[in-house]
Each structure stands twice: as C-alpha cells, then as structure tokens.
Image (cartoon, grey):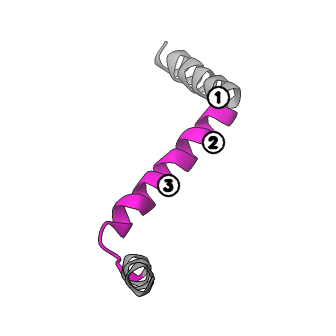
Amino acid sequence: MNQLTTFFKKFWNDEEGLETIEMLLILSVLIVVAIMFKGKIEEWVKALFKDIDEQIL
C-alpha cells in the first residue's frame, strides 16, 4: 500500500509533459468553440470576402 501511495504522490508532483497536456486542452476547447459557433463564423467569413470582393471591383 505504501508503494502505491508513493507512486501516486510522485505521479501527481511530476510536471514532465504538463505543457503538452495544457496545449491539447487549449486546442480542444478552441475546436469545441469553433464547432459551437460554426454558423456565425461562416457568416462572418462570407461577409468579409464579400466586402473584399466589392472593394476590388
């Protein structure tokens, strides 16, 4: 039992690879937000390209 407790304490305090996990969490949140607001993002991009097209012509 003592070995198991020691293992979990070391595992909890180990920060190796923590930055990778943080980056994956941030990326996953961004993907979820993009999926949630997909329609609004598409409307915004279409309006942006329409304005650019009108300015060019």
Q: In which quarter of the image is residue 11?
A: bottom left
Please name the residue that numbered disc 2 is placed on. 33
Q: What is the magenta range?
A: 13-36
In the image: residue 34, left or right of residue 7 = right
Looking at the rendered structure, the secondary structure element under dot 2 is: helix
Expressed as whole percent of the image width and height from the top left, the position of residue 9 reads 43, 84
Depth check, front residue: 32 or 3? 3
Position of 1 relative to 38 (above/below): below
Q: Which residue lies furthest to the top in this view?
A: 57
* Gap between marks 1 and 2 measured at Cα: 8 Å
Position of 17 relative to 55 (above/below): below
Position of 21 relative to 14 (above/below): above
Expressed as whole percent of the image width and height from the top left, the position of residue 35 reads 62, 32
* Residue type (three-letter) at the residue carrying disc 3: Ile
Residue at the (29%, 72%) spot, across then down: 16
In the image: residue 38, left or right of residue 56 = right
- Residue 38 is marked as 1
Tell which circle, 1 or 2, labels the residue nearer the N-terminal end: 2
